[in-house]
Amino acid sequence: MKIASIVGARPQFVKLAPLDRALRAYRGRKFRIKINHIIIHSGQHYDDRMNRIFFRELGLPDPDFNLEVRSGSHGRQTGEIMKRTETILLQEKPDWTLVYGDTNTTLAGALAAAKLNRRVAHIEAGLRSYDRTMPEETNRVLTDHCSDILFCPSQSAVCNLEKEGFNNILNQGRLTATTRKTRSFLRKAPFPWVINVGDIMVDALLLNLAEAKKKSRILHELRLKPRRYSLATIHRAENTDAPERLRALLAALREAGRVQPVIFPVHPRTRKYLERLALVPFASERLRLIEPVGYFDMLILEKNAAMIWTDSGGVQKEAYLLKVPCLTFRETTEWLETLESGANVLVGSNQERIRERIGVDRKPGRVRSASSTRSEKFRAYGNGHAAERIVSVLLENDRQ
């Protein structure tokens, strides 16, 4: 059985790691089905700090193919990835093409495979912010509607797809993919399938947090003490490409630095806009702009922060899982469970709303730690076995 994973951005490398590990664990056992897992890297993230370091830290093999598409407009980038992926899929003829998340790489890979009548599985399916101005929302919706299996991270994702007309649904919950109920579903239900396997990002966090604690030196290097700093990330186009919005966010972060230092690992595209708008001088000892960091360093910075500020979907969720209060520089989010727990609050780019929430005037903030509302099992997002369930479903289907 040949499985092709198409990735291109650092959140996808993180999601790929548990899946690749689950496939290698299966290969190590004596089963009838032999698995060949090939990795196709679109080149969407090509900076070493956003790319190579993640493969090294996560123990991923080098990609079998690198399309080297690099950056560009959404249409050009998506088209180039689709065109180059098609050539490889025609050559390799995988039984399953796996796509991850909501980037241009996700959509391009799914479209290329679907148009060749190759089976597509979408990992992290069913998420919706219902904000069509976000390119990621378009990518999510179109990818879901051309996939054969939609592996959902949560019950809310399943509900979103049910509202869109998907009806072959297996909401596994705590079930494994080898139960009688699952096998019956896999034998009888036609594609597309919607299966709640839990969130593969939980797998990644549980697999890597202990290793990060052992190997990361980031707190020492930055002279930081746990809970004595905030962590910020900004990278989405709606924030970086709008000068007034970016200025407002930088001003809010600088003001927050009066309460405690703010550490800001700067995405390469964000730095480009900061330099273009002459906003780099906003940095100070209290608002520290640093280079992008690897996965281990980011986990440690997140885990030990007093508060996290972000526009990243993945960082919102990691803050929730690590029980760190989060303020999100967006008006909508696809991770509804983080809002329902009170651990995450949407503040957009309005300085007054941000000031209200973070206690710049030294009043207590209103954002709660997720620890007061969620158990250690991360019930909303599964128990860290999503990758095993995904592999079981793919292999069970191959036995039919």
Image (cartoon, grey):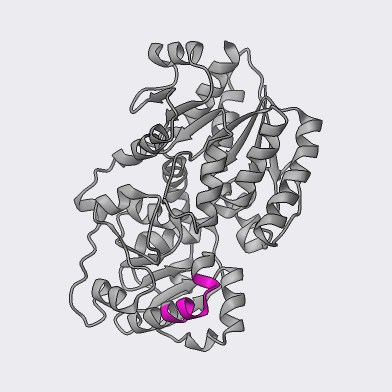
- Does the rendering let one see residue 82? yes
Q: Nearer the viewer, residue 224 or 36?
A: 36
Query: Residue shown at 59%/39% (left/top)?
Result: 99
Asked if residue 246 lies in the magenta stretch, the reply is: yes
Q: Nearer the viewer, residue 330 or 31?
A: 330
Instruction: Please determine whether, in this image, residue 336 is positioned above or below residue 216.
Output: above
- Does the rendering let one see residue 65? no
Asked if residue 257 lies in the magenta stretch, the reply is: no
Instruction: Please determine whether, in this image, residue 219 is positioned above or below residue 337.
Output: below
Q: Position of residue 196 (x, y in %)?
A: 41, 31
Q: Position of residue 352 (x, y in %)?
A: 29, 78
Q: Which residues are magenta?
A: 239-248
Query: Residue shown at 66%/19% (left/top)?
Result: 34
Query: Residue shown at 24%/43% (left/top)?
Result: 375
Q: Main secondary structure of the magenta part?
A: helix
| Quadrant of the image containing the N terminus | top right
Q: Position of residue 327 (x, y in %)?
A: 33, 65
| Quadrant of the image containing the C terminus | top right
Question: Residue 368 falls in which quadrant of the image?
Answer: bottom left
Left or right of residue 211: residue 46 = right
Left or right of residue 337: residue 79 = right
Left or right of residue 134: residue 63 = right
Q: Position of residue 258 (x, y in %)?
A: 32, 85
